Image (cartoon, rainbow, N blue to C red):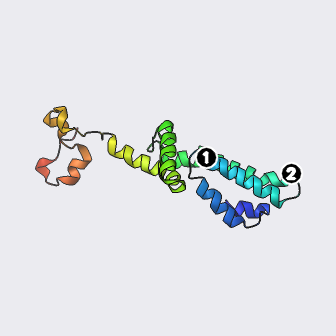
Amino acid sequence: MGGGLYCLGVPNAAMWGMIVAVLNFVPYFGPVAGVFLLATIGLLSFDTLWQALLPPAWYLLFHLLETNLITPVLLGRRFTINPVVIFVSLIFWMWLWGVPGALLSVPISGFFQGRVRPRPGYCQPSANCSPAESKPSGRRFRLINHSRRNRPERR
């Protein structure tokens, strides 16, 4: 981010690049704040309006590419948190801890979701599961119990 701002001629490009990179971690409000910040910096640093709008346009382009292409390809479908939960979590943790809470809201939500959501193949003790449902299956069983006689049959 800072390299692009440097090529556009923004003063202290590395510092502004780091600030908007950190703002990018705040869901919903961070990118909006980054665009406004870079628009202000552009208007104060450059003479023409077109040149002043290049830094926020660069950031917006970079953010849209990262949000819609790079992150989905890297994370795939493994990180699934409802957007409403993210928004409510953001508001709650920002109210509780301020800016650090806003930065930590999504990781905290992911942690709690991982602890609350039941795992496949896991039977809760109060659910009256049959013994076949409560046994570990497949690869996990083979990693835990290495003896040949206790291996599950292959199909």
First in residue order: circle 2 vs circle 1? 1
Name the residue at 72% across, 60% down: 4
Name the residue at 59% across, 46% down: 67
**x, y (%) of residue 93?**
48, 49
Secondary structure at numbered mark 2: helix
Nearer to the camera, 18 or 95:
95
User: Vertically, is 133 above or below 16?
Assistant: above
**x, y (%) of residue 120?**
29, 39
Name the residue at 64% across, 60% down: 19
**x, y (%) of residue 32?**
66, 47
User: Vertically, is 84 above or below 26?
Assistant: above
Q: Residues within 10 Å of mark 2 (few under 14, many from 20)?
A: few
Residue placed farthest to the left in the image?
Answer: 149
Viewer-nearest of discs 2 and 1? 1
The Cα–Cα distance between marks 2 and 1, rounded to whole angstroms, is: 25 Å
The quarter of the picture where the C terminus appears is top left
User: Vertically, is 14 above or below 72?
Assistant: below
User: Vertically, is 85 above or below 75?
Assistant: above
Nearer to the camera, 101 or 73:
101
**Which residue matches tag 1?**
29
**Which residue matches tag 2?**
49
Name the residue at 22% across, 42% down: 137
Secondary structure at numbered mark 1: helix
**x, y (%) of residue 114?**
36, 45
